[in-house]
Amino acid sequence: MNNFDEELIKKYVARDKWKTAINKLQSGYPVQYIIGNVEFFGNIIEVNESVLIPRFETEYLVEDLLSLIKQYHFNEPEIIDIGTGSGCIAISLKKNVKSTIDAVDISENAIRVARKNAKNNNVNINFITGDISNIILNRKYDIIVSNPPYVSYEIPVDDKTKYEPQNAIFAPDSGLYFYKVILEKSASIAKKRSIIAFEIGHNQASTIEQMAFNYYPNAKVIAKNDLNGFNRYIYIIND
């Protein structure tokens, strides 16, 4: 616990609940769940234990993608956000570029949170509950974006993540499972001219780059670092 988190509790939590909230904070419970929201890309996103807490690293995924949409002249793109969780990526894109957006998640509880966030942020997004590996989608997309579960089950993580939905954090096959699923699915849902954007684990870039070239041998594949110098993003550009 730090003083900033305690000040957040005093700002957002009713006074008669301060003690309970601070006790939860001291036990390692995330302050974002206690106050019920987090700021993401200038938007207030409600969160609870049904959704992963948005991280600042993901804001750079949105920022990069908005720049690429502009750079490659995608006008009014059709976008799909796979594994939308709280809806933070889809909402941020929708508020910054004229677009049609579908957002998919396997969790009905997550979709309920995302729908509420879209309503609170005054954006129109089509939310779909389902497993991306077998869901039937009725359109092709200019932009496919995903921050999927990518942590290997063998990797130790921060104790605070134990309160977050584990299926939004961990993935089989050394954390690579969903990249394989999404790239395979993209063959049927990506337009010929398209961008696929991923947030990735810090040690996964070279493997995912090779996977990308296997599916898109003529694509431009860009790996980018986060502010800490770790590989964090992959962009597959079919132009």
Image: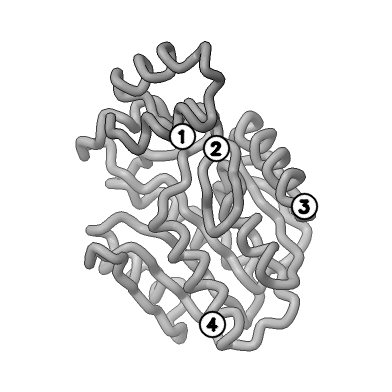
Amino acid at dot 3: Asn
Label 1–label 3 contact, CB within 8 A = no
- Within 10 Å of disc 3 (Cα), the crowding (few <14, some 14-19, many 20+) is few
Tell me if mark 2 has few (under 14), some (14-19) or many (20+) residues whose alpha carbon lies within 10 angstroms of its own: some
Q: Nearer the viewer, residue 197 or 20?
A: 20
The answer to the question of whether label 1 and label 2 lie on touching residues, with beta carbons closer than 8 A, is: yes
Earlier residue among tags 4 and 2: 2
Q: Nearer the viewer, mark 3 or mark 4?
A: 3
Residue 238 is tagged as 4
Tag shown at residue 232 = none
Under circle 2, the secondary element is strand
> Badge 1 local density, few (<14 within 10 Å), some, or many (20+)?
many
Q: Position of residue 143 (x, y in %)?
A: 61, 70
Residue corresponding to mark 3: 122
- Report the residue at 40% width, 33% height from top: 7
Give the residue type that dot 4 points to: Asn
Q: Which residue is mark 2?
A: 37
| C-alpha distance separating marks 1 and 2 | 6 Å
Q: Is residue 181 left or right of residue 77?
A: left
Q: Earlier in the sequence, mark 1 or mark 2?
A: 1
